[in-house]
Amino acid sequence: MKQIILIEDWTGEAGISVSLGVPVYSALSIHATVLPAMILSGHTGKNLPVRLHTGAYLEKVLSVLEQHPRKTDALVVGYLGAPGLLSVVNRLRKLYPEATVIVDPAMGDHGRLYSGIDGEMVKAYRSMLCGADYVLPNRYEASVLTDLPESADTEQLLDGLLALGAKHALITGVREGDNTGTILKGVQGEKTSHFMPTIQGGFYGTGDLFKAVFSGLLVLGFPANQALSEASLCVSLALQATDKEMRLYGINIRNALARLSTLPLEVL
């Protein structure tokens, strides 16, 4: 069984972040060790939530992991909420040097940072890109990381992310006419993309679902272009299944999980 470590927030009210990612990994028969970066009463796109910082707890967990190391195929980083957790991520990368590092710099969307995110958190995420195998920002997050305007050409944003040290850069939520998709570019100039018809409305948790499916399929050996297209399809299936009145609390991943159950658990 493949093993990953997922470090991101646990949000009590909404079906996002860890609450969304773990079922995806389970559907792919991947064991996920969860390190809660922060415990939140609700998501940061709604109101300022109640927060419980977990830095001291994570330091103790890391000490245990360092004493009893085991094989880990990937380190998946999501919303951290506190720049001090950069040291935790760095210790994990040192402990598991062979693991694929996937960073979702969850900081904001729609032209603004999430509540509680400041310049120090931006700097922390920016430093994580150095040596990361994949970075998965949306267009706004890419602009913040690269100090380029959000209106910049997508190619410029991708090149800016690669210049920060990432081996592959993806930008999600790219609009082209009536379609929305993701574009990936690697340091060797290789590119791939996948677009689907835009589903109108405001949703929370789409990035979390994309990250979980994409990272899980990479760990199973799927090529990046197939992992990207399947992750995009799963997001579309989830959005279509989400009732309008429930959008504030996350997305319905039932059909996405059904799709994942049809995929092979290993690609040779």
Image (spheres, rainbow, N blue to C red):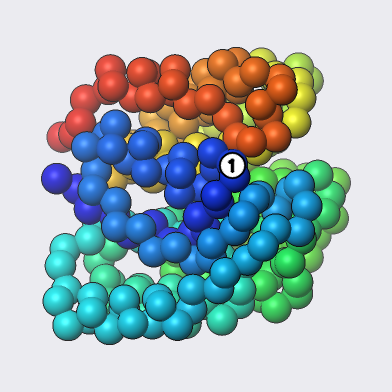
- The residue drawn where x is 61% and y is 73% is 82
- The residue drawn where x is 66% and y is 50% is 43
- The residue drawn where x is 22% and y is 37% is 29
- The answer to whether residue 185 is seen in the rendering is no
Image position, residue 91 (x, y; %): 37, 80
Indicate the amino acid at tag 1: Ala
Give the crowd class for mark 1: few <14, some 14-19, many >=20 residues within 10 Å. Answer: many
Image position, residue 260 (x, y; %): 34, 24
Image position, residue 228 (x, y; %): 46, 34
Residue 261 to residue 184: above or below: above
Residue 39 to residue 44: above or below: below
Q: In the image shown, does 25 or 245 lie closer to the viewer?
A: 245
Q: In the image shown, does 193 or 50 lie closer to the viewer?
A: 50
- The residue drawn where x is 32% and y is 40% is 25
- The answer to whether residue 151 is seen in the rendering is yes
Q: Secondary structure at mark 1?
A: loop
Q: In the image shown, does 151 or 159 lie closer to the viewer?
A: 151
Looking at the rendered image, the quarter that the N terminus falls into is top left
Q: Which residue is mark 1?
A: 14
